[in-house]
Image: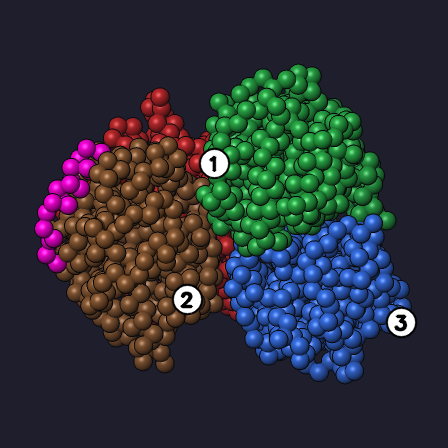
Chain colours: A brown, B red, C blue, D green
């Protein structure tokens, strides 16, 4: 009998971090995929990831709306509580042999708690990393609720083991998002017209002489500062005058501050070198990055995928602090002068080398193989 | 301005583990107590702890019903999800400066998640211990969500630090339940009539020549076995013929199995040496223990309070496995012959020495003092 | 394409009130049944109706736990709120063409609200009747949320129309529970041994010289009185000394009072003419009624099925007040003397005639036919 | 002892419909106000009504976030379910003597259900009216769950009684929103600068030669059409070239369609006669209306307050269909030509007469007086 593997996707970026594993699970003779799509992955405002998932050919077993409106810390808690209640019903009806929870977004804790409490083995993808903000608490709490840990690199594995997990339940698979990057690297040319295919708002600039990409999310635990922080970046990028493709932030406490800051800046300045996109298919986005002069902001893409791709990254602020990084990354504070200077240095420098810190392009297959053979268990003790 | 300390009590045993700290918080000039009573602490079937709390003179700031009926693993998850949703509303309205979560019952995770996500510093009482079952996952996940760790002993402190917490945020206070035990030890005589004061059902035996106490909870992750396991104990205790005061189990997945087993056994055998109680005030229960010939079952009281009290404990099965224990404890499997033999050895042996493994009787004051002076913080990183 | 009909069953008695319609829906060429089982229909304490449903050959599309423990008015509200949240997810995933909600239990309001808010036509079975307690508010609120009304008799139809519903959306189908009664009447002999087949607790009496049946539920809005009320009945029935088969009450606010009253009475009196059952398959229960000397209590079975079966009913208190009744019913207050006197009169009187007040035995087929042909709609206005 | 009156406000427009009653309750010697603010009344996107409530000097007893993000029919159901769960906890802690639910927004059903199930007398403000869409089902379902009905006019009272409510529990008080209008009419001059005081986006036009006001909400049960419908109005109003102050829609299924339509239209046409506001204090808004040449859209303000104020209304589409209206109202379909023609006729016509259809300006006091003296009850039966 096939093992039923229930994967819960709660956001657009999480889909990129599991997609090649989904394909490998679906193709594996001993596994059966149960795919649950929930939270912001169902919402227009965050790019309706569910549409991409269906277009990629995956059948969705269940959909769960659980995002509270208002993007406050209170509502992060309530969204997670509602997710926990609803996912338990979903698991109760699906009776999976294991559940898979991805990375460290706050609402993913619901998947881990539901699985752990229901005596279903919990598999955690991408534990053991170190970052700032609430993600840090979430990630390690999920580790303590999980039974199998499939991590991106050796350092992450060591961290998981130091927290008291048995080494035999920890494997370095790399991150599936790098699989997509590796695949795209085989055909790196920009084979689509961004404005035509994705619309967006703002100015339509000639991209043939180079462009940069910006993606800046609010920092959860400082969310009142979000508006000031985004304005520093907006001003710095505007001042360079260099063509810029800007991506809208995800759902998170404070995204109102960030989104509001962007709207206000556009209203008052309408900067002629900026174009704003809401979302983009992963492969298109990666090709856009490969062909860019670099990425600016605080997205983990700049740290993870761009290490592999050899794309320069200007990483702003504390959101990625603690995360392992390659030579492609320059860290700057939320300061318009510093950001502008870093962009100008970047535009004047040679391209950095590729570094497979977060994976070598074969994570998806490795994950499926381990899920098919791992000795299922949901009991454990602190392994000291 | 006084620091607002919000303590959430979700079950009768948790109340014992925090009571002297509540008193000390209330008496502290720099602290203001906000007391939330939730889950099984409000329910008749589990002894209506809320009544004892009020009788002890504490004002209850808010009450939250969140226990799903049915006592299955699914409903443990849902109870926690509902608790999380409702506690976030409570915290949103109360705006505490810190929240306190106690020990490791499954539903306590809700308190920790709500606090962590709402940027309220989370204080965890009794982390770092090692046991079996789902409590193990819950306890360490709560550690990873908490900012301040007030633990029972040095080994627990070491475990918390090894999991990546900063040593400066970990203090050995002892467990407040030992404070109560220490207080009771000053006047150890059995100063009440158990049958008169607490009623209960079953036979009324003469206790003047000694009696034993039984308290056996279902083991969450094996809940289908609960009925068989309780029957082994029931049969062993019946076979000894020794007067026995039996305490009803708490809410937990499988308590139906345990409760059903007790009901069925009584219906068929009506053992003449057994009397059943639903609950008892802590002080009375401790006096009952001090004056008993020993405790049988799998309650943590046998490991914790009884170490301090010097009461012999026959600990059955895996529920307390991993937990540090003193010379008062004898471990046996779920086997009627083994249980009976251990009881008979116990009845024939001298009383063990007191060992302050879980506290020295001053935990409550220490906790209040730390809460009043600790530098409030809700940001942290893996401290390796 | 077949119309997808989603039926939500939330309790054992509701199953009897829809069962023949389920069979007819399943057999209908233009309908596809989606069966959701929720609330107390999943719980041991209330007879695990879900087991009977599966044994009858129905596939269950989704199961939803939503009963809060504690049986208080507060928890009735929370159970309904949770049901509403979870049923919306179920409907969102199943995309039914209509939802069917049965009668007037408090938690059934969740089905009606979810359907109405999600623009799914709502079909209400058994609206328009008049009773006491919270059921009354629930029933008529469901009517105002529903688009199609399939009622038990002409008076109910008139009531629904007077409340402002269009006559074209109201049909008298009879109640499916009477279909079962009609079927059982074809082979009325008691073809099973109640004690052997259903166990239960209490004394095992000889039933060959007649017996009575008791079923008394708590009255929601007077739940503190529940214990006193049940004791009156217990005492009256005990005093008759007549063999009595007593059925345990359903979930409802106050059933603790009722259940507690029964337990206490048994503990103190252990009446030798009482045997207690937790539940029974509908057909067996009906045969038991047909062969009984009458039913005592406040169950609607005494008013509805017993009218058709011609079984005498002693109806206690206000729970069925307002409900249309036949000549088989004698009303008495919660008073032991009055109850005892009524029982003795009943035992001395001839059997009443059958009256098809609540249906003629063909409700199931009529319901399915209407569901297949009714013009689907979810918009309406007060029709005055 | 004062009667504790718990009023639940879930949206900005509901606040206007209860404000003068809140003042009168607070001032009444026999009443104590408990004010709960929930749902969109807490959200930025819908004007943060809670800020106005506090500025008006009311203390807020509890705040409850319960709006699910995504504005779909599914989420309307979930928002209501969550509201029901949370409000039961609030009522359980506050122990009010009665709860007041306002009008007919979908989430107000939660207040009525919680009250009814918890045996708290439920007071419904503004039942008995007739409109289109889901509000219609909600309003009458709330009537069937309520014990006291305080309605706007005689026709509404008759409708409530025809639905089976006892006449003695129905009173015509008028609507408190008219009290505000009556108060404002005493000093009708526009005493503030709209652009300065409320900001907003779009063009800044000279208003001294007249302006119109637009407020168009999505129609729940046709929400896919919302974008087309709003575009018709946008185009019609743009074509008139007449200065227009446009108010953003409230939360409701489909407001994404409406909001998206407005954003897209602005992006492409940037009409020079439109200015957009998010919200406005009631008194300011009423003065704006009094001084306007008329209101266009589908807000109930056009039907209710404008009848009293004698302001012409062009009412578009079905949202207000069924609602009683005065001579100030012209109905038009969602058609740009029809809307434009109606606006031009309006601009060329004399001002209509004031008609007190929805109140005479003394509703607040009447409501408080009735709440103080009504014989509290939560039991009722269909009164035919």
Tell me if residue A373 comes above or below residue A194 in the rendering: below
Which residue is located at x 83 percent, y 46 percent? D162
Instruction: For residue D370, say whether it is visible.
Output: no
Q: Disc 1 sits on a residue from what chain?
A: D
Q: Disc 3 sits on a residue from what chain?
A: C
Residue beneath label 2, please? A54
> Which circle marks residue A340 in the picture?
none
Q: Disc 2 sits on a residue from what chain?
A: A
Instruction: For residue A87, say whether it is visible.
Output: yes
Is C147 or B23 nearer to us in this picture? C147
Q: Is residue C105 magenta?
A: no
Mark 3 residue element: loop
Residue B280 % position (x, y): 45, 45
- Magenta region: A336-354
Crowdedness near tag 1: few (<14), some (14–19) or many (≥20) residues, C-alpha within 10 Å? some
Which residue is located at x 25 percent, y 60 percent? A190
Crowdedness near tag 2: few (<14), some (14–19) or many (≥20) residues, C-alpha within 10 Å? few
Image quadrant of residue A51?
A: bottom left
Mark 1 residue element: helix
Residue beneath label 3, please? C353
């Amino acid at each position: 009998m096939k093992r039923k593997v229930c994967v819960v996707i709660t956001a657009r970026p999480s889909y990129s971090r599991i997609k090649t594993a989904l394909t490998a699970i679906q193709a594996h003779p001993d596994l059966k995929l149960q795919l649950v799509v929930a939270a912001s992955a169902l919402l227009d405002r965050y790019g309706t990831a569910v549409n991409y998932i269906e277009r990629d050919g995956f059948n969705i077993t269940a959909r769960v709306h659980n995002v509270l409106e208002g993007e406050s810390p209170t509502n992060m808690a309530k969204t997670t509580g509602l997710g926990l209640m609803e996912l338990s019903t979903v698991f109760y009806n699906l009776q999976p042999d294991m559940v898979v929870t991805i990375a460290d977004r706050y609402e993913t804790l619901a998947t881990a708690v539901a699985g752990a409490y229901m005596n279903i083995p919990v598999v955690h993808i991408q534990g053991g990393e170190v970052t700032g903000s609430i993600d840090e608490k979430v990630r390690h709490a999920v580790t303590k609720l999980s039974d199998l840990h499939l991590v991106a690199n050796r350092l992450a594995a060591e961290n998981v083991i130091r927290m008291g997990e048995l080494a035999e339940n920890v494997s370095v698979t790399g991150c599936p998002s790098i699989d997509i990057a590796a695949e795209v690297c085989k055909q790196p040319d920009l084979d689509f017209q961004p404005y035509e295919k994705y619309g967006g708002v703002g100015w339509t600039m000639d991209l043939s002489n180079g462009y940069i990409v910006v993606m800046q999310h609010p920092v959860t635990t400082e969310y009142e500062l979000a508006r000031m922080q985004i304005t520093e970046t907006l001003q710095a990028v505007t001042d360079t005058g260099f063509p810029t493709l800007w991506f809208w932030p995800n759902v998170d406490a404070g995204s109102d501050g960030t989104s509001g800051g962007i709207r206000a800046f556009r209203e008052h300045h309408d900067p002629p070198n900026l174009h704003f996109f809401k979302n983009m298919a992963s492969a298109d986005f990666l090709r856009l990055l490969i062909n860019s002069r670099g990425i600016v902001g605080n997205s983990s893409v700049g740290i993870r995928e761009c290490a592999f791709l050899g794309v320069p990254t200007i990483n702003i602020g504390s959101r990625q602090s603690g995360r392992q990084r390659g030579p492609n990354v320059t860290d700057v504070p939320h300061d318009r002068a510093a950001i502008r200077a870093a962009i100008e240095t970047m535009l004047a420098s040679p391209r950095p080398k590729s570094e497979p810190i977060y994976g070598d392009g074969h994570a998806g297959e490795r994950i499926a193989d381990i899920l098919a053979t791992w000795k299922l268990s949901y009991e454990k003790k602190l392994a000291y």
